[in-house]
């Protein structure tokens, strides 16, 4: 099954992608995590992407489409995958179609902007493996340490309030129109993102019939 998770930054796509990944046994592909890794390692496209990421803008379509193409060509994607944070523009959605990728379901996690702004300030991510947490809603067992790999959990630079506003504006302008694109194909299901993560997960899994 090939699944897309849509939703504003901070709506909980990453967390729900992890849940689906475990339940369905298919990999989670987060272009944001791949890009952050590239920035950390100082690779060529990491250097190109860094400024856009820090300011809350989108990285160019060419770069992210290239990343995605390479990633879904790997063996572990043969039985399906979950796209978390891709596509984000109509050019990217078109690129998936052009690659011949058949999308089964698109799940939107719907959360009000005001709730997002509140959530982002508490979000923490593991520097090492990218797992995401929240200081109130999904705390780590040991403060500041990733439950999965013991890495250090930190606040992302782009989770600062002014950058969050910019990211929300980019989402509404460039990504939200994709709801129509997939809605017209009968693939879109919308799930209300709740504060209680397990409630959202139950609704997401039900929407996917998992
Ligand atoms: P995320 O963790 O998904 O919120 O992504 C963090 C940042 O990476 C975004 O704010 C963008 O700058 C960049 N990024 C991730 N995925 C994409 C994408 N599909 N298209 C363009 N930029 C992206």
Image (spheres, rainbow, N blue to C red):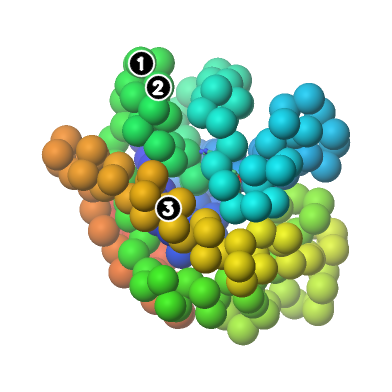
Residue at image coords 34%, 24%: 94
Number of numbered discs present?
Answer: 3
Instruction: Report ligand 1 position as a quadrant.
Output: top right
Categorize mark 3 by other alpha carbons within 10 Å: few (<14), some (14-19), many (20+).
some
Residue closer to the observer: 57 or 110: 57
Image quarter hosting the N terminus: top left
Judging depth in this view, the residue of 23 and 16 nearest the camera is 16
Q: In the structure shown, which secondary structural element does the residue marked by tag 2 occupy? A: helix
Q: From this view, report whether residue 95 is shown above or below residue 141.
A: above
Dot 3 corresponds to which residue? Answer: 171
Measured along the vertical axis of the image, is residue 139 above or below residue 97?
A: below
The image quarter containing residue 142 is bottom right
Residue 49, position as x, y percentages in the image: 69, 36
Q: CA distance from mark 3 to mark 1?
A: 23 Å
Give neighbour class at mark 2: few <14, some 14-19, many 20+ (Cα, 10 Å). Answer: some
The reply to whether discs 1 and 2 touch (Cβ–Cβ < 8 Å) is yes
Q: On the image, numbered disc 2 is attached to which residue?
A: 95
Q: Residue at x 64, y 77 (%)?
A: 122
Q: Secondary structure at mark 1?
A: helix
- Give the class, few, some or many, for how many residues have Cα within 10 Å of label 1's Cα (few <14, many ≥20): few
**From this viewpoint, is residue 33 visible?**
no
Question: At 41% from the left edge and 65% from the top edge, which residue is drawn?
Answer: 201
Disc 3 + disc 1, Cβ < 8 Å: no
| Left or right of 198 in this view: 107 | left
**Is the residue at mark 3 in contact range of ligand 1, meaning its CB lies under 8 Å from it?**
no
């Amino acid at each position: 099954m090939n699944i897309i998770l849509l939703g504003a930054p901070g709506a909980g796509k990453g967390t729900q992608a992890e849940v689906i990944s475990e339940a369905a046994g298919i990999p989670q592909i987060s272009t944001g995590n791949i890009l952050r890794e590239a920035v950390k390692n100082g690779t060529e496209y990491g250097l190109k992407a860094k400024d856009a990421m820090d300011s809350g803008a989108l990285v160019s379509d060419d770069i992210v489409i290239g990343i995605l193409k390479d990633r879904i060509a790997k063996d572990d994607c043969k039985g399906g995958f979950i796209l978390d944070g891709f596509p984000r523009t109509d050019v990217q959605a078109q690129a998936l179609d052009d690659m011949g990728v058949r999308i089964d379901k698109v799940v939107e996690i719907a959360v009000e902007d005001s709730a997002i702004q509140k959530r982002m300030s508490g979000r923490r991510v593991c520097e090492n493996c990218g797992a995401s947490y929240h200081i109130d809603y999904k705390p780590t067992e040991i403060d500041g340490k990733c439950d999965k790999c013991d890495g250090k959990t930190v606040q992302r630079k782009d989770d600062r309030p002014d950058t969050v506003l910019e990211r929300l504006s980019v989402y509404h302008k460039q990504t939200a129109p994709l709801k129509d694109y997939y809605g017209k194909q009968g693939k879109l299901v919308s799930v209300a993102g709740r504060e209680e993560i397990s409630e959202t997960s139950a609704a997401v899994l039900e929407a996917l019939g998992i």
